[in-house]
């Protein structure tokens, strides 16, 4: 038993010693890594300082000894003269052609059996044109009965009114009895009330009959007919009428652009299938963000005469940022170092042309152009070719291409 206890104690001691050794090793590795990183940063700073000193000495040597072997051969570059110009930024999205006037014609009232359809696919129809007729046998029978009842009561009322008028004339001459006069008056009033009720009933039966007659509610072309004679005409079957003379472009804009697009924003639209383009403005913006697509809908009215078709793809460019006059350069001339963004420009020094580093602050970028907020001025000579292997202070020779 004592031997087992001793062995267990030795095992625990060895495990503890190993753990401490691993921990100490890990700490040493971390300290070593931090030390190496610190030395690397120091060496980079030393190199930068040495580069500056070398460049300064080379310039001094060039001034004192024009035959020095260290004199650099000017590098051939191309220059572009900086000038103010407009800059536009666009949001590029994919939309589709949509139709503002699409009507799915169904019975205006209760479903009914189709008796006749007067149009077919491809027909042009006008608003108010008869397109279908439902079975009207019962509705017509009810309307005829209501009409007959109204006519009968009207005739009775005419007769009762005539009798009352005559009895009234006699009563005015003190002929006849007051009871007779009151009876005739009551009869007229009862028939008037009955006629009013029957006329209301006839209006209802007339409306029911009218619902068996189906009219087009828009001008356009019959695009689909899914209803057939003999079937029940309801919301299942319909006659689709499309007016392609009134089209729009619909596009969904991501919600992060909600503050950049507004009603009236300028838009460039291209229809690739037709190789046609047009400019317009945002005519409608939805007020809510879609829960599924996290975007909001914009609409642009399409001009007439383009022969567009609903559901065609449209490439949409919405102008969300515009500056009428600013400095714009090609994004490829922009370089980056530890100090940030910079470009190289040409500058004269002792009757020589040299490359000078110019730190710049950039704004928006679009395509291959970037807006320069500060660091460049009109008239500056930007190195636009040969800048990749050119350094600050290097002599250059140019072929100037001004804008």
Image (cartoon, rainbow, N blue to C red):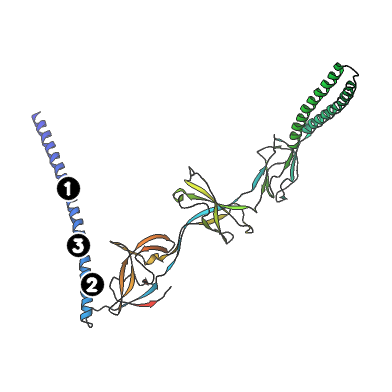
Q: Nearer the viewer, mark 2 or mark 3?
A: 2
| Residue nearer the viewer, 268 or 38 | 268
Q: Above or below — where is 313 with respect to 5?
A: below
Q: Give the structural element (helix, strand or loop) at label 3.
A: helix
- Does residue 244 lie above or below 138 as drawn? below
Give the SS element for disc 1. helix
Q: Where is residue 91 drawn, in percent x and y?
A: 47, 56
Q: Residue at x 46, y 48 (%)?
A: 255
Along the polypeptide, which appears first: circle 2 or circle 1?
1
Residue 324 lies left or right of residue 270; in this view the side is left
Residue 111 at what x, y percent from top left? 70, 35
Q: Position of residue 14 (x, y in %)?
A: 12, 39
Q: CA distance from mark 2 to mark 1?
A: 42 Å
Indicate which disc residue 27 carries: 1
Image quarter of residue 5:
top left
Say what secondary structure mark 2 lies in: helix
Q: Nearer the viewer, residue 95 or 53?
A: 53
Work out which quarter of the rendered image holds the C terminus and state it: bottom left
Q: Earlier in the sequence, mark 2 or mark 3?
A: 3
Residue at numbered disc 2: 55
């Amino acid at each position: 038993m004592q031997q087992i206890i001793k062995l267990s104690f030795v095992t625990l001691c060895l495990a503890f010693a190993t753990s401490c050794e691993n921990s100490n090793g890990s700490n040493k590795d971390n300290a070593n890594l931090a030390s190496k990183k610190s030395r690397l940063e120091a060496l980079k700073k030393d190199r930068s300082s040495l580069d500056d000193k070398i460049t300064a000495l080379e310039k001094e040597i060039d001034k004192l000894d024009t035959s020095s072997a260290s004199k650099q051969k000017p590098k051939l570059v191309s220059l572009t003269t900086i000038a103010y110009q407009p800059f536009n930024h666009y949001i590029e999205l994919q939309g589709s052609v949509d139709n503002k006037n699409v009507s799915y014609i169904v019975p205006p009232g209760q479903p009914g059996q189709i008796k006749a359809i007067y149009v077919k696919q491809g027909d042009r129809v006008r608003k108010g044109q008869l397109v279908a007729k439902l079975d009207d046998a019962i509705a017509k029978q009810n309307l005829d009965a209501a009409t007959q009842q109204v006519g009968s009561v009207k005739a009775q009322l005419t007769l009762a009114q005539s009798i009352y008028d005559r009895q009234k004339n006699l009563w005015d001459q003190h002929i006849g009895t007051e009871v007779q006069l009151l009876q005739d008056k009551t009869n007229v009033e009862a028939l008037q009330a009955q006629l009013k009720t029957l006329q209301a009933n006839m209006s209802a039966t007339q409306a029911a009959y009218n619902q068996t007659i189906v009219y087009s509610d828009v001008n356009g072309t019959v695009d689909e007919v899914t209803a057939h004679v003999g079937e029940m005409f309801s919301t299942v079957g319909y006659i689709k009428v499309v007016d392609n003379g009134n089209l729009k472009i619909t596009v969904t804009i991501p919600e992060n652009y909600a503050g950049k697009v507004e009603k009236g924003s300028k838009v460039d639209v291209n229809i690739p299938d037709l190789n046609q383009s047009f400019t317009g403005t945002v005519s409608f913006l939805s007020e809510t963000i879609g829960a599924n697509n996290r975007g909001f809908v914009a609409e642009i009215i399409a001009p007439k005469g383009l022969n567009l078709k609903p559901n065609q793809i449209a490439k949409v460019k919405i102008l969300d940022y515009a500056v009428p006059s600013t400095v714009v350069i090609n994004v490829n001339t922009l370089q980056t170092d530890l100090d940030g963004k910079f470009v190289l420009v040409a500058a004269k020094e002792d009757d020589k042309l040299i490359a000078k580093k110019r730190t710049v602050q950039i704004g928006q970028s679009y395509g291959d152009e970037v807006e320069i907020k500060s660091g460049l001025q009109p008239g500056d000579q930007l190195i636009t070719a040969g800048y990749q292997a050119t350094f600050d202070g290097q002599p250059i020779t140019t072929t100037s291409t001004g804008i």
